[in-house]
Amino acid sequence: MEFRFNVFGTLVAVSGEEGKWQAFYLGAEGKRRPADFVVPADIAGTELREYLADLFHEDATPKHSTVEEVLRR
């Protein structure tokens, strides 16, 4: 399973399953690199958006003020 989020203007993918998450920063042309943060094992898929908002709230700007799920597959 993979979730993709726009986290205050930064595209992030979280893949795997509950208890075994891996996070990536998404770039141009489908490129991805490992993220420099960890999603704890006890975070449910339905809690990922809120977790990312709490983790990165200091990155919010007037132009990019939300965390939005953009894809789930």
Image (cartoon, helix red, strand yellow):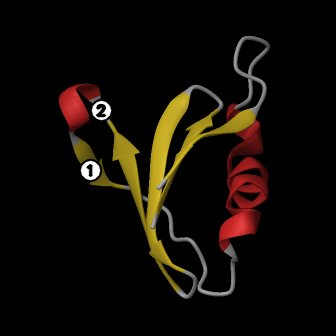
Mark 1 sits on what residue?
Answer: 33
Where on the picture, by quarter, is residue 54? bottom right
Q: Are marks 2 and 1 in contact (CB under 8 Å)?
A: yes
Identify the residue shown where x is 47% and y is 56%: 73
Identify the residue shown where x is 79% and y is 13%: 62
Identify the residue shown where x is 48% and y is 45%: 12
The image position of residue 39, as x and y in percent, is 57, 71
* 30 on left or right of 57: left
Where on the picture, by quarter, is residue 55? bottom right
21 above or below 23? below
Q: Camera-side residue: 69 or 67?
A: 69
- The quadrant in which the N terminus is found is bottom left
Amino acid at circle 1: Arg
The disc, 2 or 1, on the residue closer to the chain's N-terminal end is 2
The image position of residue 51, as x and y in percent, is 73, 61
53 above or below 63? below
43 above or below 33? below
Indicate which disc residue 27 carries.
2
The image position of residue 46, as x and y in percent, is 74, 66
